[in-house]
Image: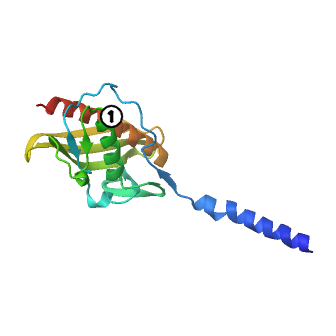
Amino acid sequence: MLRAVLLLSLALVAGCAVGPQARDSVASYDFGLARADKEASPRLQHDLVVAAPVAPAWMDSTGIYYRLAYQDASRPQAYAQSRWVMPPAALLGQSLRARIARASNAAVFTPADGARADYALRLELEEFSQVFDAADRSRAVVRLRASLIRNRAVVAQQGFSVERAAATANAEGGVRALIAASDEAGNALIDWLAANMKK
């Protein structure tokens, strides 16, 4: 009798482990491990403060957003069972700051460091979503605006817009395409910084 009760208890515990939890689990994504940059040799020669990107209020969550352009592109929606580990602006800011640091011979700071630097970079994230042009066809859209500041004056300002086709029409496909588009935007941003950060 005792053996039967023990076996029943074990079966119930095992059932809980593979039951609703497995079906209801949420997939969390970040940008993964750092990928090789376009150029190994540092090209930025000045100290730079990189502020965290600002983003629209609707993006201030961990949701992975998509738009159904073939129905109503003005309605961003979030996947129910997939999310980022932090809001997209924070993830993108972290990735861009690390990429800029790898491309620099000088120091890269955040505003919280309280350090003085030759230049400051402000970023506005305008769009970061998976856009469906049809039920089975989507693309990642990353749009941001950068302002390079020196001595409280704007030295240069530039918008960056990158689109990448998603391999699959789901959250995972959107994530992979958004990461690839972010990498491309990061490379373009560094090219732009190298061209505009002068002595």
Secondary structure at badge 1 equals helix
Assess disc 1: are there few (<14), some (14-19) or many (≥20) residues with their C-alpha within 10 Å of its C-alpha: some
Q: Is residue 155 left or right of residue 12?
A: left
Whether residue 147 is visible, yes or no, is no
Q: Is the image coloured rainbow, by chain, by secondary structure, or in one colour?
A: rainbow
List the single residue furthest toward the right: 1
- The image position of residue 176, as x and y in percent, is 44, 41
Q: Is residue 180 left or right of residue 104?
A: right
Quadrant including the C terminus: top left
- The image position of residue 59, as x and y in percent, is 32, 57
Q: Nearer the viewer, residue 88 or 127?
A: 88
- The image position of residue 142, as x and y in percent, is 31, 43
Residue 23 appears in which quarter of the rendering?
Answer: bottom right
Q: How many marks?
A: 1
Residue 35 appears in which quarter of the rendering?
Answer: top left
Q: Residue at x 24, y 45 (%)?
A: 144
Q: Nearer the viewer, residue 103 or 59?
A: 103
Amino acid on which the number 1 mark rests in the picture: Arg
Q: Residue at x 48, y 45 (%)?
A: 172
List the single residue furthest toward the front: 115
Q: Nearer the viewer, residue 155 or 57?
A: 155
Residue 4 appears in which quarter of the rendering?
Answer: bottom right
Q: Residue at x 44, y 54 (%)?
A: 85
List the single residue furthest toward the bottom: 1
Query: Where is mark 1, residue-wise?
Result: 102
- The image position of residue 154, as x and y in percent, is 9, 43
Quadrant including the N terminus: bottom right
* Vertical order, 104 against 74 (above or below): above
Q: Nearer the viewer, residue 40 or 184?
A: 40
Whether residue 129 is visible, yes or no, is yes
